Image (cartoon, rainbow, N blue to C red):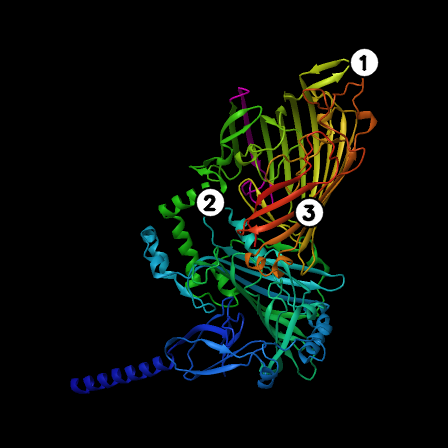
Amino acid sequence: MNARIKHIVTVIGLMSFWILSSSYSQAQTITRLKGKVLDSKTGDVIPFANVSILGTKYGTQTDFNGNYYIESKEEKITVKVSFVGYSPETKSIETGKTLNINFRLRPLVTDLQEVTVKGKKERYRNKDNPAVILIRKVIANKDKNRKESFDFYQYNKYEKLEFDLSNISEKFRNRRLLKKFDFVFNHLDTSEITGKVNLPMYLKEQVSDVYYRKDPQDKKEVIRGERFTGIGNYVDNNGIKLYLEALYQDINVYDNNINLLATQFLGPIAPLAPQFYKYVIIDTLDFKGVKCVNLGFSPRNKTDMLFQGSMYVSLDADSSFAVRRVQMGFSKDINVNFVTDLRLTQEFDNVDGSGQMLTKDELAIEFNLLKKENGMGLFGQRSVSYKDYVINKPIIQKTFSGLKIEESANYNKQTEAFWDSSRHQTLSKKEAGIYTMVDSVTKVPAFQRFMNTATFILEGYKPMKGFEIGPVNTFYSWNTIEGFRLRLGGRTTPLFSERIAFETYGAYGFDDKRWKYFGSATLSLTDHNIYTYPIKHLRVSYQQEIKIPGQELQFVAEDNVLLSFKRGVNNKMTYNNVFQVDYLNESKSGLALNVNFKNIRQEAAGALHFDQVSSNGELVPNKEIVSSEVLVGLRYAPNEKFYQGKNYRIPIVNKYPIFNLRYTMGIKGVMEGQYNFHRLVAYANKRFFITPIGFTDISLEGGKTFGNVPFPLLTIHRANQTYAYQPEAFNMMNFMEFISDHYGAIFIDHYFNGFIFNKVPVLKKLKLREVITFKGLWGGISDENIPKAGNGLYQLPVDEKGNPVSYTLAKQPYMEASFGIANIFKILRVDFVKRLSYLDNPNAPNGIGIRFRMKFDF
């Protein structure tokens, strides 16, 4: 073949390739559709309407604001939109373009009804409603359709949780502050769910094996592999992982109450559901070869904590009315903060002819602080797939021993080969790049400066190399005895040492002209740092400080500047010199052991006096009380999860109870300890979900001190004279007002989550939430601990005129109640508190006390 012929053949070949490539490219042209679904009469948006491309598997739902996004490579496209109570609408679409198309659905009202009943909607009824008859059959059969009906099952589970910065605009990308981070925009991706441009920021993968036995009921999950992105030492990466797991936990659509966003929703298949939901048969269809009814459901009241969406109910010959597919979210009118969109999709398949098992599970949530439709936010999606089901094959007892969630050896150090073989689906190029992208970001100096500033603002610590200064909210405070107080302190970080940590501060009061200080050294007894759960450490500390007797605040420092503002008289304190050795051993089962030795020297300060009553009735002043105590404490918190900070925890409350038991023994003669005594304290609390009217938190506490001891070693009940509402204190009680050697207390808080306010036309737009509380305290002081002439005990505190300011609870219980309005500006709670007993005590507040609390909550 000569050169000319070769050239012609080459040209023809290239032209043929170009033509074929062009044809293929046209065939694969992507059509992108977005827009809104609206009510044709009112113009209101319709959330969670079904949008599908006929004849294909492509489909989606509208979000809270009625928006949809869908794309397809089909040559011919017909889009169908449907929703409960509306006539479906279909449109043929021009392919190969990005189009913005709105759909307007007509309510299901006949022309005759429109003429004869003007302005009135047809009343929805359960009676003789075929949709309600169907859902009641689903409810009646759900116990045999849920996977817990099997005697045994096991499967392999792959979970992927991704968090993105969502709705990235060109304007945002071009900001000067982000020029040093421009490499991250190479990882931008368009969400298949929202159609928004997102920047992946976090990825977690987990592979596990799950085992279940019906009788006796038990379940075990063994994590074979886990990895996730982190941002270095700025936050507790494991704490973030646990917090996200609590937000994106397993959901069983068959459950009566479904846990989501730290609260409970009444499920659409609960026995009570027909009283709160509306059901409509949308159409019948074929799903994976099975004839199904597409059953729509929505809340009767859009503001209630309920779902809306649709489910496919199977109608095959041997059907037990099983759910084959469900898509649901909730109304934009619901009283939930920071969430602009939520979608749950689950699919069930028949496994080996044994029954229905979950095979697809996706939960997508879009967060936005301001809930702006077009604003930037966070988009999180959890995708779970299941395979290798084994049904009703007996599982040996040994499998269920140990922890319910167990981590196999090196589960967090698996190789790439492990992940390549264990994933159910291959990571996309964008997903695979998240690990390296996040690691690169943490090395950029600008990011490090940003995180240092953010840590200082949010946690109150200024990071340095291996050390951080703070907390900033304790730098300045004041009280009646110290006057103006300055404090400066800090602590080491894991950059200094993974196993050893030091913490210290110094403070000075300008009125009492005395120094206060603290120092501690902590040794981790595990191979991880002292802050990582489960904690196992040994700590030695010494503190010289001024305190209000009986006040041990939770989560906050007592010299917090915000707690400097107090009502009433606050001139009785003690100077404390405290040496202690503390051993803490937590386990993943939820059981924790605490052993503590403490030597305390208490010196009266201000108007407080330690005066003994002599045998002839005279008061004999004493300078100090010295006690040496050994404490053994047990705490059991099954299934507890929390965000673990550097020196604090934010618990994620669930339905499981928490128990505390503490025994303290006072030892006379050890380090000059002056008293032998025994003290036993028990505490329990639990959250009770009462769907759909909120939840109730109940705490019970009781204690008894055995032995002959002065009042500073008895129980001085927790009072609160600040204007900050404190859940574990009595907010209308004065400091040191009540003292006991035996007592019982109850704390009841009910959160309605807006159930009442949501039904008031004006208030429901404000998304306010109602809280009611009751606190009761019973107790007293036994005869052996009542100060008497010659018994060596100290007189109970009195004021400058000799009038008592501390009392027993012998007459009646102390009680207070409150009504609170929460979720003001999404973060503020205001409580109106009323004291119900001991109103004749001097300085007792008789009116309504107003207290404030800041809390971030969904």
Q: Which of these two is toward me, 755 or 592?
A: 755
Q: Is residue 342 left or right of residue 633?
A: left
Q: Secondary structure at mark 1?
A: loop
Q: Secondary structure at mark 2?
A: loop
Q: Residue at x 48, y 64 (%)?
A: 420
Q: CA distance from mark 2 to mark 1?
A: 62 Å
Q: Which mark is residue 773?
A: 3
Q: Is residue 572 visible?
A: yes
User: Where does label 1 land, which residue?
Assistant: 615
Q: Secondary structure at mark 3?
A: strand
Image depth: mark 1 or mark 3 in front: 3
Q: CA distance from mark 1 to mark 3?
A: 46 Å
Say few, some or many: other residues with alpha carbon within 10 Å of mark 1 (under 14 / 14 to 19 / 20 or more): few
Magenta-drawn stretch contains 778: no
- The mark nearer the N terminus, 2 or 3, is 2
Say few, some or many: other residues with alpha carbon within 10 Å of mark 3 (under 14 / 14 to 19 / 20 or more): many
User: Where does label 2 land, which residue?
Assistant: 234
Q: Amino acid at mark 2?
A: Tyr
Q: Is residue 425 above or below residue 454?
A: below
- The mark nearer the N terminus, 1 or 3, is 1
Q: Which of these two is toward me, 474 or 751?
A: 751
Q: Quadrant of the C terminus?
A: bottom right
Q: Is residue 257 left or right of residue 187?
A: right
Q: Amino acid at mark 3?
A: Thr
Q: Which residues are magenta?
A: 510-535
